[in-house]
Amino acid sequence: MLKRFMENLLGGAEHPSPAPDIRLPLATCVVLLEAARVDESFTKEERRQIIKTLQKRFALTGEEADELLAEASRASRESVGLFRFTRAINEGFSPAEKRAIIEEVWRIFYSDGTLTGHEDHLAHQLGKLLNLNHPQLMDAKMKAFKEARREGI
């Protein structure tokens, strides 16, 4: 299954043009993984948040979400940037779905109880790459912040 995700995301002889429905889970996972790693740590809370998001958004089992996370980790290491992943998201998701993804990014940032300057910078960079405006980005940030406060994080 994940081999198919990668082949479709990256293209290849058999798949010259990636299918949006296949590459979206991987692209989304890479973005979330980068969000979790930007502060140079990857906590259990961040991992749980990513798995939960993948299961909910793409109707994956826990095992499938774990496999997707492993594949996204490899894809992230082999990539020179986030553009091709955010491009897949832009092509496959509606504006509302892209706002939901940036909310997940903020949730990951707040899941460990802190927001670093690197995390804030990445969120703004992702907002631009996902064609979101500043008010949309700040609305997502405030929503995630309020949720984290309610949960006592």
Image: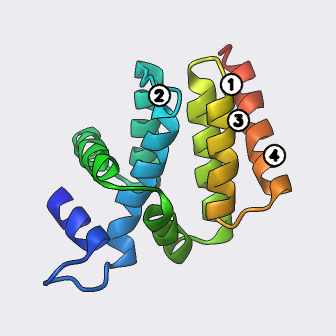
- Horizontal and vertical percent position of residue 31: 47, 50
Toward the viewer: 142 or 55?
Answer: 142
Q: CB under 8 Å between callouts 3 and 4?
A: no
Indicate which disc, 3 or 4, sits on the residue closer to the N terminus.
4
SS class of the residue under badge 3? helix
Q: Quadrant of the N terminus?
A: bottom left
Q: Amino acid at mark 3?
A: Ala
N-terminal of the pair, mark 4 or mark 2, is: 2
Image quadrant where one finds the C terminus: top right
The location of residue 96, given as percent across then percent down, is: 67, 64
- Secondary structure found at label 1: helix
**Which residue carries the number 3 mark?**
144
Disc 3 to disc 1, C-alpha distance: 6 Å
Q: Secondary structure at mark 4?
A: helix
In space, the residues marked 1 and 2 are separated at their CA atoms by 13 Å
Q: Reading the chain from its start, which is encountered first: label 1 or label 2?
A: 2
Q: Amino acid at mark 2?
A: Glu
Give the farthest residue toward the front: 80
Question: Position of 79 compared to 126: left or right?
Answer: left
Label 1: how many residues lie within 10 Å, few (<14), some (14-19) or many (20+)?
A: some
Q: Label 2, label 3: how many angstroms apart (C-alpha)?
A: 14 Å
Q: Amino acid at mark 1?
A: Ala
The reply to whether residue 46 is in sight is yes
Few, some or many C-alpha atoms within 10 Å of disc 4 (few <14, some 14-19, many ≥20)? Answer: some
Q: Which residue is mark 4?
A: 138
